[in-house]
Image: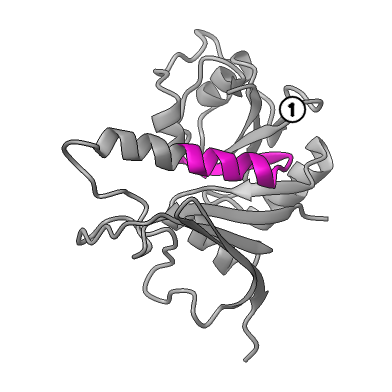
Amino acid sequence: MKPHVTCLMLTSLDGRLGSGRSGPGAEEEIKARGRAFEAAHDELGGDGWIIGRVTAQEMSKAAPHPPAEPGRPARPAHVARRDAGAYGIILDPSGKVHFERGDIGGDHVVVLLGGEVSDAHLAELAADGVSYLVAEGPEIDLAAALDVLAREFGVKRLLLEGGGGVNGAFLKAGLVDEVVVLVWPSINGVTGERAIFEAGEEGLANVLSLELTSFEARSGVVWLRYAVAPRSS
């Protein structure tokens, strides 16, 4: 049984990820946005969180350091630990993110990889105490990965906190149970700025429907919570 997935995002009024601010006061606003997001993350709780490669590389600054003799690392899975209090799950199809340890902020790291990732990279992850799951093909089967996370790690509730592409992929696959959006009191307005949901030219409007389940304002930030369901034809 797949985990319950809540997509949690903080956005400007126009649905953009970035603040758009620069100059005096920009750094303070970025920190305030971060505190609001972390407070929501802690309140919603869960057994783990999911992010994409770009965000993961921003969090982990490690350089490649494969073992001199990688041997034959385990495929399709390596489980470094099953008793973590929480899990940080990274979508990294090509194996580009590196780590220096097996956790991020105390949450055990589990990397979801494409089938073409090298043995050297897998050996590096295992040596660093990182768990991983390798897909059969070059693309990650998100539904299958969630099933393994539930079965092997006991994950029952996940917070999806990816970029627009990651969020869009999960929504398009019908794997998101609810969406929680924190609307920051600002308008970004920058052309081409990343959006919180992106799903290519087909988009998502014909794929899913939303039902508002709650809303409230907290210190100027509006919380919107929606149940997600497939759109009937």
> Left or right of 193: which side holds 92?
right
Q: Secondary structure at mark 1?
A: loop
Picture residue at 52% right of the left edge, 48% below the top: 138
Picture residue at 45% right of the left edge, 13% below the top: 65
Front in this rendered view, residue 117 or 71:
117
Height in image: 179 above or below 121?
A: below
Res. 101 image quadrant = top right
Per the image, is 203 magenta?
no
> Left or right of 157: which side holds 71?
left
The quadrant the N terminus occupies is bottom right
Height in image: 76 above or below 109?
A: below
Q: From where the camera sits, is residue 104 visible?
A: yes
Picture residue at 16% right of the left edge, 38% below the top: 23
Mark 1 lies on residue: 79
Q: Residues within 10 Å of mark 1 (few under 14, many from 20)?
A: some
The quadrant the C terminus occupies is bottom right
Picture residue at 53% right of the left edge, 47% below the top: 161
Res. 2 image quadrant = bottom right
Estimate the x, y position of residue 203 in percent, counting from the top left.
Answer: 43, 74
Q: Amino acid at mark 1?
A: Val
Q: How many marks?
A: 1
Estimate the x, y position of residue 176 in percent, counting from the top left.
Answer: 64, 62
Estimate the x, y position of residue 167 in percent, counting from the top left.
Answer: 51, 57
Q: Farthest residue toward the front?
A: 219
Q: Tell me the magenta residue range.
A: 35-53
Height in image: 66 above or below 179?
A: above
Front in this rendered view, residue 29 or 99:
29
